[in-house]
Amino acid sequence: MQVVHTAAELRAALAGQTGTAFMPTMGNLHAGHVSLIELAKRHGGPVVASIFVNPLQFGAGEDFERYPRTLQADCEKLAAAGCELVFAPDLAELYPVPQTFTVQPPGSLANDLCGAFRPGHFSGVATVVLKLFNLVQPRVAVFGKKDFQQLFVIRELVRQFNLPIEIVAGATLRDADGLALSSRNAYLGDSERIQAAQLQRELAAIVASVQAGERDFEALAASAVRRLKMAGWRVDYVALRDAETLQVPTPASPQLVALGAAWLGNTRLIDNIEAALGNPA
Ligand code: PAF
C-alpha cells in the first residue's frame, strides 16, 4: 500500500487508473471503516482512502484539536483490509489558501438535526468532500450510514453538481451492547461507555413502537429525550424522519429513520436506526 501526502503524489499514483473506489476518513479508524474498505473492494477498481482531520467542519470549542491523529495505526489497518493507496495531506496541502469558496447546503438541510447544533458543519463536510472528490476522481465513494445526515448531504452534493460518482452506503457496525462504532467512542470513560448504548436502545424502542403501529412521532421522541435526560445525558435531539427525504414523515413515508445526538460528559454521540413502516421486524 502506498501512502502519499501531496496532490502531486496522488495524481502520479492514480495515473492511468480507472474505476477507483474511495473512502474519505478523518482517521482513528475502527472496524466500521474496515468494513467500508471491504465494501469498496467489491467494486473492482483500486481502493483509495484519505485521512484528513478537516478543520472546516469543526465549530469553535469542538474537538478538532483533540481528535486522535493515529496515521501509523490507521495505515496498518488499511493495508490489512486491502486498501491500495492512502492520501494523507496536511492542512497546508489541502488548504494552501484560505478556503473562501465553499459549498453551502440549503439551510433546510444544513441547519436541521445535527446542523442545528453544529453551525457550519455540513458546509465544511461538503466543501472538503468536493475537494477530495476532485483530487481522487473516484467512480465510487463509500460512506457509513452512521452519519445519516452527512450521507444525505453528500448524495445531494453529487446529484446537484452532476458528479459522476456512485455513492455507496455501508451499514453501521455495533459493539455487542449495540453501541455504534465511532472514533469518538475512545473519549468515553468506563462508566460512560457502559451507559453509551442507551442512545441506541432508545432509538430501537422508538422504531419498535412505530412498527407496532404508534404514529405520534413527537411523543415517542419526547419520551426518549426524557429518559436520556433522566439518565444524565445532555440531549441535542431525538427525531423521527422520512429516511428518503429526511423530512418529517408523512403517512405515505415508506421508510423511517430514528435519529439522535446526545452528550455523555464531553462526548457527543450520534446514532440512527431505519425502519420500514408497517413492517414488523
Ligand atoms: O465522516 C467523516 O469522517 C468526515 O466527515 C469526512 C466525510 C471524511 C469529511 O471530512
Image (cartoon, helix red, strand yellow):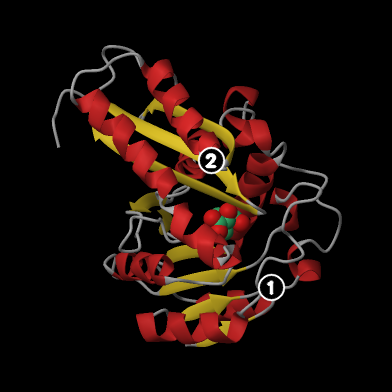
Task: Tell me which residue sits at (38%, 50%) in the image.
Answer: 166
Task: Tell me which residue sits at (57%, 84%) in the image.
Answer: 3
Name the residue nearer the viewer: 23 or 114: 114
Residue 261, which numbered label?
2
Disc 2 to disc 1, how far (Cα)? 30 Å
Q: Is residue 45 left or right of residue 189?
A: left
Q: Position of residue 128 (x, y in %)?
A: 65, 53
Sequence-first disc among 2 and 1? 1
* Residue denoted by label 1: 89
For label 1, being within 8 Å of ligand 1 is answered no
Q: Is residue 278 left or right of residue 93?
A: left
Work out whether 174 lies above or below 268.
Answer: below
Q: Position of residue 78 (x, y in %)?
A: 45, 80
As helix, strand or loop, the secondary structure at mark 1 comes to loop
Q: Position of residue 121 (x, y in %)?
A: 67, 43
Task: Tell me which residue sits at (47%, 54%) in the image.
Answer: 196
Name the residue nearer the viewer: 143 or 256: 256
The type of residue carrying mark 1 is Pro
**Any part of residue 177 in sight:** yes
Work out whether 272 lies above or below 258.
Answer: below
